[in-house]
Image (spheres, grey):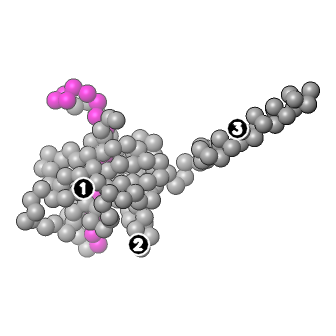
């Protein structure tokens, strides 16, 4: 009987250790929404910028986002205030089923980037595609800059 009790205690402790190592599964606050997690690449028809985002549960990595035409400098370019290829803390909040805000930690707190998520059938690709439309604005700017990203399957 003592062996069974000892075995039960060991199983409970092992289970508690595994749950602790995997983090808090039940609390989604402070994380990126699940459908935003993955690799996103530029998909805009004008393709002014080339780059991608890699979003995990609580980190975002900005890869690239250089301008195609290096002689043209747009001060509104996406992610200009963030380091490239460095995992940044962040999270998202949904406004409704298709819209929300991505928060990325910066030196001065968090920067807010509004987004619109969509999933639609694209006949040219013959597949359903997840898109993310990001809106970039600077204080005092009248015309925001939009960037459309497409989710890339791993």
**Residue 27: horizontal and vertical position, in percent?**
59, 48
Inter-mark Cα distance, 1 to 2: 20 Å
Give the position of the C terminus as an image quadrant: top left
Circle 1 — which element? strand
Inter-mark Cα distance, 1 to 3: 41 Å
> With 10 as the anchor, is 59 left or right in this view?
left
Rendered position, 29 above or below 128: below
Residue hosting label 3: 15
Q: Quadrant of residue 112?
A: bottom left
Residue hosting label 2: 107
Toward the viewer: 101 or 23?
Answer: 23
**Residue 60: horizontal and vertical position, in percent?**
39, 54
Q: Earlier in the sequence, mark 2 or mark 3?
A: 3
Q: Earlier in the sequence, mark 1 or mark 2?
A: 1
Task: Assess whether residue 69 is covered by the magenta stretch.
Answer: no
Inter-mark Cα distance, 2 to 3: 39 Å
Rendered position, 138 above or below 85: below
Residue hosting label 1: 64
Q: Would you call the spot at circle 2 few (<14 residues within 10 Å), some (14-19), or many (20 or more)?
A: few
Decide: marks 2, 3 in contact (CB < 8 A)? Answer: no
- Is residue 77 at all visible to an observer of this figure? yes
Q: How many marks?
A: 3
Q: Earlier in the sequence, mark 1 or mark 3?
A: 3
Q: Residue at x 41, y 44 (%)?
A: 37
Circle 2 — which element? loop
Q: Quadrant of residue 153?
A: top left
Q: Residue at x 41, y 41 (%)?
A: 35
- Is residue 131 at all visible to an observer of this figure? no
Which portion, as a residue range, is magenta? Answer: 123-139
> With 75 as the anchor, is 99 left or right in this view?
right
Toward the viewer: 30 or 21?
Answer: 21
């Amino acid at each position: 009987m003592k062996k069974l009790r000892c075995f039960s205690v060991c199983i409970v402790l092992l289970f508690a250790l595994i749950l602790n190592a995997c983090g808090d599964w039940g609390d989604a606050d402070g994380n990126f929404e699940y459908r935003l997690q993955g690799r996103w690449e530029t998909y805009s028809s004008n393709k002014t910028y080339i780059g991608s985002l890699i979003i995990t549960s609580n980190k975002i990595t900005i890869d690239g986002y250089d301008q195609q035409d290096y002689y043209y400098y747009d001060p509104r370019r996406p992610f200009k205030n963030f380091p490239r290829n460095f995992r940044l803390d962040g999270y998202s909040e949904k406004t409704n089923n298709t819209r929300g805000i991505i928060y990325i930690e910066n030196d001065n707190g968090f920067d807010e980037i509004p987004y619109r998520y969509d999933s639609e059938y694209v006949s040219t690709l013959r597949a359903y595609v997840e898109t993310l439309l990001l809106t970039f604005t600077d204080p005092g700017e009248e015309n925001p800059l939009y960037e459309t990203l497409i989710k890339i399957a791993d």
